[in-house]
Structure formats: C-alpha cells, structure tokens
Amino acid sequence: MTPPPSSPRPLINTTPHAHRMSYRIGRGEQGVLTFEPYKSSLLPLWRFRTVAVARRSAADLWERFEQFDRDDEADFVGMDMARKFIQMGMTRAKRYANHAGGRKYRKGTRDELPRSTTDEVQRNPELREKEAASQVFREVWERCRAHEGYQRRKVEFLAEQREWAKQQAKS
C-alpha cells in the first residue's frame, strides 16, 4: 500500500485554528470518520483484511503519527487522529474475529448476534487471521498511547483548547 502523496504543507497549516480547536479527543474512535482534512489524509492508509495488510497499514499510520509529531509545528490533532485510525483497525478486525461477517447486531435492531467462541476462532483460519490482524494494530495502538510526545502534546492541546474557549466566551 503506497501512502497518498502528502500535501505540500502540514495539515495543521491548512486547517483553520477554530476548526482544530473544535476537535474532541473523545473516547475511542469518536469523530475519526468526520474530522476533515485529517480523515481524508489517513483513511486511504487504513486496512485490516489480512495480517500482512494490517502490518502495512499499521506501519503507514504509525509513520504518519510520528510525522505529525516531527513537523515544524507539531500537530496533536493529526497524532490523535492517526491513533484513532490505529485503534479502529484493532477494533474492526476484532469485530470480524468475534462475529462472522463483522456484523455485531441483527439488521434493523440492537439485538447482538452470537459471538464466535475461542474454539471457533482457533478452528477457523479466517477468524484467526482477523484476531491476529487485531493484535498487530493493538501493539501499535499501545505504542501511540505511551508515546512521550503524544502525552505531552495532549496536555498542551487541552490547555490551548481551554484558553481558546475562554477567549471565545469573552468575544
């Protein structure tokens, strides 16, 4: 999988400050498929069909995560969006391991479909493949969460966001 060509300027320089300040770290993967331009930049890198595809995808997303950290103006929103895509790779692959066809709920209802048992996962090569793909993403996701730059930039971003909100309230 070849990453899409990067924009000539980092995304932080092409995204209005007010839009970045509207970003919510949120729980899990919330907002990952709606927050532009980051979604369009990262979505082409996100795949989880097989272990090999998951490895390439996780490596590409990790590279973008680190690139957002290295840019002249480090971009926490980009780092967090990359982390969310990595987490989404982990959870989606796991869902396909737990539920045949990846469908968690009965169509048109909120009734959860039966989960695959550990024995079924071990016997079924497709389910085993999805479980292993999920593990590939899990390892990279844990690396993201423990990343020193990510931790520091998260604190800085939240402080900047609070200050920005105070300024907006005064206006």
Image (cartoon, rainbow, N blue to C red):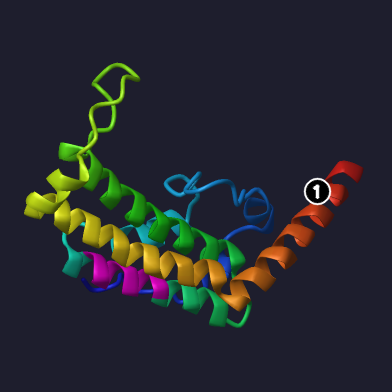
Horizontal side of residue 70 vs 33, given as left or right: right
Quarter of the image with the C terminus in it:
top right
Which quadrant of the figure has residue 133? bottom left
Residue 54 x/y as whole percent: 24, 65
What stretch of residues is rendered in magenta?
A: 54-62
Which residue is farthest top?
109
Residue 37 at what x, y percent from top left?
Answer: 47, 56
Question: What's the amino acid at mark 1?
Answer: Ala
Q: Position of residue 8 (x, y in %)?
A: 45, 77
Whether residue 138 is in magenta: the answer is: no
What's the residue at 63%, 77% (across, down)? Answer: 73
Residue at point 35% right, 50% down?
Answer: 91
Q: Is residue 158 visible?
A: yes
Q: Position of residue 36 (x, y in %)?
A: 48, 52
Taking the image as shown, residue 57 lies to the left or right of residue 52, namely right
Q: Quadrant of residue 20?
A: bottom right
Furthest toward the right, the residue is 170
Above/below status of 110 relative to 70: above
Residue placed most toward the observer, 168 or 50: 50
Identify whether 116 is placed above or below 19.
above
Query: Which residue is labeled 1 in the image?
Result: 165
